[in-house]
Structure formats: C-alpha cells, structure tokens
Amino acid sequence: MSTMKPTDETQGPAEDTQPDTSSALTRRSLLARTGATLATGALLMHGRAAQAQSSVPGAHGPREGSAADTGGKVARQSHLPPGKAGRDYRPVVVPNGAKLPWKDVGGVKVFHMVAEEVEHEFAPGLKALCWGYNGHVHGPTIEVVEGDRVRFYVTNRLPASTTVHWHGILLPNGMDGVGGLNQKAIAPGETYRYEFTVRQSGTGMYHSHHDEMTQMALGMVGLFIIHPRKPVGPRVDRDFAIMLHEWRIDPGTRRPDPNEMTDFNVLTMNAKAFPGTEPMVVRKGERVRIRLGNLSAMDHHPIHLHGYQFRITETDGGRIPESAQWPETTVLVPTGSTRTIEFVADEPGDWAMHCHMTHHVMNQMGHDLPNMVGVKPQGLDAKVRPLLPGYMTMGQTGMGDMAGMHHMPMPANSIPMVGGKGPYDDITMGGMFTLLKVRDHLDGEGDPGWYTPPPGTQARLANADELRRDGIDV
C-alpha cells in the first residue's frame, strides 16, 4: 500500500463528497450532552477536518474516520507528520526491555522487525532458546503517535512460517496479520510489508498469528504503545510498560514447552522472573502511569501494587472517561487485554508489585509435589544421605526455606522456587514480582538501592516492656 497524500477540499473519493450532515450533527449533539470530549485531536482525513477517535469508548456513534462513519469502502488512511519523542509525547520506560527503532522516510515511520531464535535469560541461572524479534524476548516495544503513518518490514529468520497481528489496532483488513485469512504466511527467508495509519491512542500489543500456540508460547509477543496526538488527562512524569507472560520450562531443559495448557512454572514481567526483574524508579510527588499487557496462554493476572491506591484509566479499548474511572489496589489483566493505571507517588519506599495468584510468584514449581507440610522427618535425613549424598527434607514448614537453595546444588538450567536478596532477609517470592522504588531525591535514573525507613516507621521485634505495658501475654 502506498502512502496516501492529503487532498484539498475539492478532491477525494466520490463517497466522501456528500457527507451525512444530519447524522454528524446528531452524533455531536449526543456526545456533547454526555459531556464527552469529541476527540483527542483533529486529523486531516482526505482534506476535510475530521476528529480522532472519541475519548469515550462506545460513544453514541461510529468512530470518526472509520468506514462506518464515512460510508466508505475502507477506513481513511491519510496521516499527519511523524510524532516525535519529547515534542509530542513522553517516551515510555520498558524495564528489562527494548524499543523498536524507526526512521522517517517521506513522512512515514519505517520499522524493521526480524523474527528469529533468541537465547533469553529469564533470571540468573535460567536461560532458554526462545523465538522473538530483533534479538529480544519479548519483542521490542513499538512506540508511535496517533495520526502517524507506519510501515513495518517483517523478515522471517525462523525455521517456520509466521505473521504479525497488530492486536487491538484499528487498520485495514488486509493488514490484520492472520495467516491464511488476511495474507499468506511469511515463509522462512521472506520479508513482508505492513502499512497503515494509526487512528487511535492507548496500549495495544502485537504477536504472531500463525501457529499461535507454538509461536506465542516461545515468546513472539510485544507491546504497541500509541500516544495521543493531543494529550488527554493529567500529564504523567513516568510512563512504564510491562508485558505479562507465562511459560513452561522444566529444570534441565533448554526450550519452553508450547504444549503446556495448565501448569506454567515461569511467570514473567517483560520476560523476566524475580529476582531478574528491574525495579520501577520514581521521585516522590511524580505522577506515574503503568501500562500492563497480558498475552499469557491461559491465565488472567490480578496485579497488586502495595502502598498505593490507583485509578484504572485505560483498557485496550482506549481511555476511560474520568467519571467512569474507579480506584483499586489490584487490577485484573485478562488474557489478550491491556489495562493502564495511574497514581501520584506520594509515599517513599520499596513497594512490591506482583500477581496475586500465589503460584504465579513461584519459579519452576509444579503441582505434582507431595504435601510435606507438618511432616516430622526426625532422623530421616541422616538415614537417606548414605544413598543420596546431600539429601535434605524440605517443605515441612512451607516453601519459605526454598529461598535458601541458592547455595545448594541445583538441576541444570533451573533456579530456586522463590528467593531474591532483600535488605533484611531473602524475599520469599519469585516469578511475576517486581518493585516500585519511590524516593524523595534521585541521583540519576538507575536503581537507588534499598530504602531505609525513618526511625519509628518500621516493624521490629517487640520488647518485654512493651508487651507488659499493653497487657500482651505471650
């Protein structure tokens, strides 16, 4: 598809020369009565002023500029000059991740994606051969602006055919990327071109849509961030993007198992399991946005942030009107969906953020383990060690002891079920777990280290005088 040039008001397809004025007025009237902002910005569509997608998903009329709105055969594809970082938007931060570079060719943002095998480290001690893009798992985050014209060249260096589906992105049918339905699959060694105009804002995703079970399970997913041409809502100081995913990697193996349906044992944020996850670092008083996408094979993820209440401001359908946003401390991110939260970082500290499905904060744990809780092994260890040197019964008091396994022999290519070093003890979590680090002052953008609570603001061992004073009999 070639780039379409904006025309003057006397030109354009025949179906656009006599717009349904009464219908347009009715739509505007309905939107005005609901108090909705008619659009996030004006786009020049085939030479006449047309509004961008309404800021209210599901508003009282079709999205302007779409085929349903114009009666045209396809959605309009004229575009605006390429949006630039710093001028038109604040770039997102992708902890542990990368961004896909682009270049301006005649007013079009041109990207090159390479589907290829990638050796990826999920956490120190756990690597696997995955499939990704441009040397990364997950694929680099795509960052564009509403109204941009984008062109993607996709080169396939995999041993199998593939495609790219632009998940949640509004575009012509032939660019949707479903192998066999919208296009021929991209054979090994081939390079395909996708091209469309971005007509929305929000958080989308991309992934293979050919043999999805295999290719997505091996890592062929990524985030597609679209900034509004005209900012909507309060300006944020930090904008983080995190992809949630799940994998089956048995100890000793070197590749994720795409056939797994229920027992996923590596749960990740941006393809990293704790303790391999980078923290999100912000300064006290800054407004923070966290975008969460979920392309896990089977599981939804309730992501809980400690220390804060936030507002859910976006779904994958776009911005939620302010009157409809609601406060939470946990946001459920369904499979195949995105959610965006915002809050002001007004309380310093090291705050946990994690999936609240408790097995999703474990590493390489299976459900076929015997229940050892309450077992009293007594002299069992000494009797077994002549047969199995180094044997130690574990699990009789729960899984917390697993955090200390880093000093013990481990199966090849495996990591302890839980455990990352904390400032006081091992943190007995793994998997889909990371940290929000809020500080009064920051020296650069790197990890500021561990937080030290001010005196009198930290839990500690109770002393005898306190217990006696308060009538606590232990």
Image (cartoon, rainbow, N blue to C red):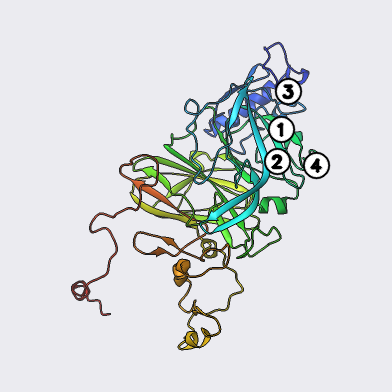
- Ranked by sequence position, the earlier of labels 2 and 4 is 2
Q: Which mark is residue 181?
A: 4
Q: Is residue 115 above or below residue 43?
A: below
Q: Which mark is residue 216?
A: none
Q: Nearer the viewer, residue 410 or 152?
A: 410
Residue 419 can be seen in this image: yes
- Tell me which residue sits at (78%, 43%) in the image: 179
Label 4 packing within 10 angstroms: few (<14), some (14-19), many (20+): few
Q: Between marks 2 and 4, how big is the CA–CA gap?
A: 13 Å
Question: Dot 2 lies on which element?
Answer: loop
> Residue 194's quadrant in the figure?
top right
As shown in the figure, which amino acid type bears the numbered disc 2?
Answer: Val
Question: Dot 1 lies on which element?
Answer: strand
**Horizontal arrangement in the rendering, residue 120 relative to residue 232 (left or right):** right
- The residue where tag 1 is placed is 194
Residue 173 can be seen in this image: no
Q: Position of residue 278 (x, y in %)?
A: 46, 49
Q: Nearer the viewer, residue 36 or 434?
A: 434
Question: Dot 3 lies on which element?
Answer: loop
- Ranked by sequence position, the earlier of labels 4 and 3 is 3
- The residue where tag 3 is placed is 2
**Are the residues at dot 1 and dot 2 in contact (C-beta closer than 8 Å)?**
yes
> Residue 141's quadrant in the figure?
top right
Q: Position of residue 135 (x, y in %)?
A: 61, 43
- Tell me which residue sits at (73%, 39%) in the image: 177
Mark 1 vs mark 4: in front: 1
As shown in the figure, which amino acid type bears the numbered disc 4?
Answer: Leu
- The residue where tag 2 is placed is 164
- Ranked by sequence position, the earlier of labels 1 and 2 is 2
Q: Between marks 1 and 4, how big is the CA–CA gap?
A: 15 Å
